[in-house]
Amino acid sequence: MKVALVTGITGQDGSYLAELLLEKGYQVHGLKRRASSFNTQRIDHIYQDSHQTNVNFKLHYGDLTDSTNIIRIIQEVQPDEIYNLGAMSHVKVSFDSPEYVANVDGIGTLRILEAVRILGLEQKTRIYQASTSELYGGLAENKNEKGMYDENSPFYPRSPYGVAKIFGYWITKNYREAYNMFACNGILFNHESPRRGETFVTRKITMATAAIALGQQDCLYLGNLDAQRDWGHAKDYVEAMWRILQQDHPEDYVIAMGETTYVRDFVRMAFSEVGIIIEFKGHGVNEKGFVASCSNPEFQLEIGKQVIAVDPQYFRPTEVDLLIGDPSKSKTQLGWIPQYDLSGLVQEMVAMDVDRVKKEIMLNEAGFRS
Ligand code: NAP
Ligand code: G4F
């Protein structure tokens, strides 16, 4: 039985990856931070099962800022594969806590690699490093001939998060070359799901779509509506992570959909899932989104009502304007075929948030009655 250790197991990707690895018959160990409130909502369904039938799932308290616990856990677990997904992953927040991000996202990666080396597991343990399209920084002149970023495009990170992740990228590559380790970077473009953190733009939009459509919120405040992202589904992207570690040779791969969409258009797509057409008027900080029509009898809003506004507090000191990735290598070499397209992703996210808001309304009503 193969043994995997996943850092960041309580996050969006960690939860999907844990499910995938268990399905494939792995014993899965996860690194979990101690928190003052519960932080395991995304994996509770697996954890609860582990008391009864799922003996192949185990969580360990630890933190990527602490070498001692990383060495101890790796020594205890003796993993065949490590997926280093743990990170402070919010780009905007990284401007507020740059030193912490450097420590966790940058040096944290080194701590994992060095622990494997100290323990003499270089030839046993394969390592996946969660690298990111933020490395490219969105510079137009660095795209390939197809107008996309690929494995050979130069990097120009535009945030403390991107700069910390570039250290993670290079130290992974360096340990591969210096110590002949099977250590790979997955350069993943944005991927989302109903489990996406609530302050990332897609989830913020789908949550607000549901709340506004059901009369629980008036207006959604966003930052840069002109940003463009290459969005895929996290379920597809964790499959690519696993495939990267099953190859004969360690290499780095871009994982992307190869299409880019404006934040503004993601808003339009989300609202159209509940039959509401949004019309945008104005520019920059004065841009506003209004209800133009409502075709679903269940979700009726006043025509002309303003539901979208721009709040400059969500702007970043330096922005990555446009990301689009070229998945050619991962499709041909890994045989990776995503199952979701953007409309399938939006549909799933909005449906789950509508269900959740409806349940909250019912619970509130039941609370009032009792
Ligand atoms: P996420 O939902 O924010 O999850 C991050 C995980 O890292 C959580 O489990 C978090 O624990 C953990 N973590 C944070 N600080 C830690 C620390 N000091 N020590 C140990 N664990 C720590 O992120 P995600 O979307 O799943 O992304 C997974 C990885 O892929 C991240 O490294 C991210 O930077 C990278 N990435 C993501 C995308 C994307 O679009 N999603 C694209 C490219 C790369 P808590 O639950 O306790 O907070
Ligand atoms: O959803 P976002 O916060 O994701 P961002 O910055 O692209 O980072 C995500 O993807 C990276 C891969 O490229 C990961 F490495 C990283 O860990 C993370 O998962 O913002 C997307 C875009 C940005 O241009 C942002 O300025 O949406 C714009 N935006 C507009 N209004 C907003 C908002 N972003 C957020 N979070 N909140 C807003 O209100």
Image: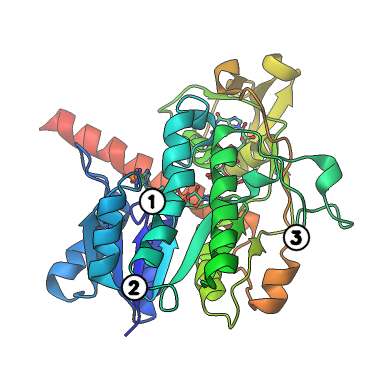
3D distance between C-alphas at marks 1 and 2: 20 Å
Q: Quadrant of the N terminus?
A: bottom left
> Within the displayed image, which quadrant is ligand 2 positioned in?
top right
**Which residue position is annotated with label 2?**
79
Specify the label residue 11 is tagged with: 1
Towards the viewer: 218 or 6: 6
Total numbered badges shown on the rendered structure: 3
**Which residue position is annotated with label 3?**
326
At a point 60% along the width and 67% down the height, the residue shown is: 177
Q: Is residue 137 left or right of residue 102?
A: right
Amino acid at pointer 3? Asp
3D distance between C-alphas at marks 3 and 1: 26 Å
Q: Quadrant of the C terminus?
A: top left
Discs 3/2, front: 2
Where on the picture, by quarter, is residue 21? bottom left
Discs 1/2, front: 2
Q: Earlier in the sequence, mark 3 or mark 1?
A: 1
Q: Measured from the top left, where is residue 244 in percent x and y?
A: 56, 72
- Residue, far top: 286
At a point 49% along the width and 64% down the height, the residue shown is: 128
Amino acid at pointer 2? Pro
Q: Secondary structure at mark 3?
A: loop
Where on the picture, by quarter, is residue 54? bottom left
Amino acid at pointer 1? Gly
Q: Secondary structure at mark 2?
A: loop
From the Cβ of disc 1, is ligand 1 less than 8 Å away?
yes
Q: Earlier in the sequence, mark 3 or mark 2?
A: 2
Q: Residues within 10 Å of mark 3 (few under 14, many from 20)?
A: many
Q: Residues within 10 Å of mark 1 (few under 14, many from 20)?
A: many
